Amino acid sequence: MKKILLLLVVLFSIKGIIFSQTTPKFTLTKDGVSPVLLAFDGSLTADIIYKKVKEWAAKNPNTTIRIDQANTQVKVGILKEKAWKVMDKNFENWYDLKYTLNIDIKDAKCRVIFDTPDVKYKVWFNKDGSIIKKYKDSKASFEAAINESLTKLNKHITEQKKVTKDEW
């Protein structure tokens, strides 16, 4: 009996790990930011994802659509104020960040590519790819700023519209 209970506990814990979905995150390295793939359930077609991406961009005041190819690609420019910081003599210097999310759309998935002309982050890394201690907070705040947009985009695409019943 104990073996059966143990087996059931293990199976249910594995099931929880398999079905728990988290939003993928951008990670900054000395070479830049790698693309992220957002995968959705099969009911989201390219045209639905495209419409939701456009809705998301329209709702965000610091966002502008730069390229708009129906059902295949949306390129969004974003301005994030106080996006990343540098600690200098125990004083935080905050910097704005202009970046682009290039969103390539297919049925049930989209690839999000981060791009920015501002490559100041390249000096934050040693030649071996490790972060310089002085810029540890800079990397963390930079990643948090760009991942905030990615998380909001993913949430907007996956959330279901609430159906309200008319009580009349």
Image (cartoon, helix red, strand yellow):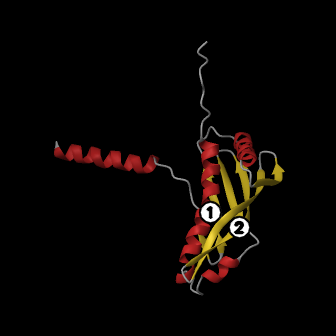
Check disc 2 and report the residue beneath it: 97
**In this rendering, would 9 be left or right of 87?**
left
**In this rendering, would 138 be left or right of 16?**
right
Q: Secondary structure at mark 2?
A: strand
Residue 82's x, y, as percent?
66, 66
Check disc 1 and report the residue beneath it: 145
Q: Amino acid at mark 1?
A: Ala
Mark 1 neighbour density, 10 Å: few (under 14) some (14–19) many (20 or more): some
Residue 153's x, y, as percent?
65, 50
Q: How many marks?
A: 2
User: Is residue 27 visible to us here?
Assistant: no
Q: Marks 2 and 1: CB-CB under 8 Å? A: yes
Q: Secondary structure at mark 1?
A: helix
- Seen from the viewer's position, the closer of residues 43 and 167 is 167
Which residue is at a point 63% across and 55% down the rendered structure image? 150
Which residue sits furthest top? 168
